[in-house]
Image (cartoon, coloured by chain):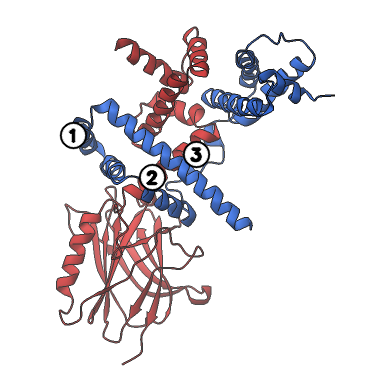
Chain colours: A blue, B red
Amino acid sequence: MPSPLDEFLSWLSPDREEAERKYKELRRKLIQYFTRRGCHIPDELADETVDRASKKIAEGKVDRSVNPKSYCFGVAKNVDKEYQRRPQPDALDLDLPFVQPEPTWSERDLACLEECLARLKEHDRDLLTSYYQYTGSEKIKKHKEMAEKDGGMNALRIRIHRIRNFLRDCVDACLRREAGNLVQ
Amino acid sequence: MDRQITQGEIIRKYLLGTLSEPELSEIEQELFFNEELSRTADLIEDEIIEQYLDHELGAREQKAVETYFLRPPAHRQKLYFARLLRHRLQSPATPDPRVIHISPVLSHPGNFVRSYGALAAVVVFGMSSLYLGVALKKAHLEIRSLEEQVQKQNDSRTPPVLFPMKYGVARGHGSLPHMVVTPGTRTIKVDLLLPERFAESFDVRLLDRRHDEEQEIWSKKDVKPSVPSQPRLTFDIPTQGIRTSTYDLVVSDSAHGSSVIYPFDISVDQSP
């Protein structure tokens, strides 16, 4: 007898591979939803959402012609409502590195960042360096100058955002690789 | 255009948990189904973090960030990464083999320590003196000018030797900055470029940490910044009594007692 999760996957797509891809994407969106709702356990809440939806599907209580993403969004809103009724921890009550005056940067973090900075195109690296080089009123002046050369302030913000995203993903991957090496 | 601005503001309020119905339901649905809008929200998340780090948020928004926005691990990781990136990019842009980077060991967190987030140091060795300069991360240019001064001060017949160091070196976490005291070295010249917020005066101590026993080798009280317009401490440490060992240079705010410790190794070269 298929498990509720199998039922859920077959609802997403009759093709198992396609279903798994859609499941991963749906889970990512659910985690993002709970993250943006300020939940401190978004992964758990996303899994709770899928569990509830899977059970409903397995019990035959959902019309399979309904869009799974829309249905899960409705379930997620209910899960969120229940979560928001619970007492919430303040971010600063959690064990957070950022409340320290300056985190102690690990050599691994810095080495990975260095490696990823080296992977940037020279122009992007220069742009990012210039963007972060200044503070206060000098920063505002410098960013205006940069924006004039780079297609306006919005275009500059988007470019910097994309470079930062690339670096963040690259550093994450590097740290995971390093952690794997340490385990071996 | 107006529509864009309004939507950006709505997303920002949503991310900070300050949006109410009916906009709340509308925007969260749009963000769930519209990938392009979701990417815009991702950009706004980054902006909130940047503004938080730059202390550009009003009191209400800052509270919303600390009590709501930063609850999810993903947002805390974004903040952590933003600080890491600033630490790296607001330090010298490219690791210069002539510049060493020391992470201080923080003993008493406080405003003084807070402002000492990341420091860089220049170590130059000459025939007659040994020069240790510690500078704030944004002080790359000042370090270079420091190097030039050191070049002039040192004996022209014996050009200074500089050692490359790594970031993030602290006692117990890898090899420490290492300097060699040659027979001709009589003083260690220390030049500290201080952050914007600094105390009126400082106490400095050099401690020998060999075998984990703390032995004070040298100290100086009430060291005042030497250049009024440029917060800076300069002082000499005599090499008398210095032996091959691990040392801590402890710089304390005289008034409040908070301190920053710079660990490093010294080797005394006995060869003629």
Q: Nearer the viewer, residue A59 or B95?
A: A59
User: Taking the image as drawn, is residue B209 in sight?
Assistant: yes
Q: Is residue A126 above or below residue B168?
A: above
Spatial CA span between label 1 and label 3: 30 Å
Residue of label 2: B85
Neighbours of disc 1 within 10 Å: few (<14), some (14-19), many (20+): few
Q: Amino acid at mark 2?
A: Leu
Instruction: For the C terminus of chain A, give its image quadrant.
Output: bottom right
User: Compared to A141, does A48 lie above or below?
Assistant: above
What residue does disc 1 label? Answer: A145
On the picture, is A95 further left or further right than B158? right
Q: Tag 3 or tag 2, which sits nearer the N-term? A: 3
Q: How dense is the environment of label 3, judged by Cα within 10 Å: few (below 14), some, or many (20 and up)?
A: some
Viewer can see residue B225? no
Q: Check the residue under mark 3 and report the chain it is in.
A: B
Q: Helix, strand or loop at disc 3?
A: helix
Marks 2, 3 in one chain: yes
Residues packed near mark 2 inside 10 Å, few (<14), some (14 to 19) or many (20 plus): many
Mark 1: amino acid:
Glu
Q: What is the quadrant of residue A123 in the picture?
A: top left
Residue extending farthest to the right is: A1
Tell me which residue sits at (40%, 28%) in the image.
B43
Return the mark for residue B77. Answer: 3
Q: In this rendering, is residue B120 above or below B239?
A: above
- Chain identity of mark 1: A
Gap in angstroms between the C-alphas marked 2 and 3: 12 Å
Identify the secondary structure beneath mark 1: helix
**Whole-percent x, y for residue B237 in the image:** 29, 74
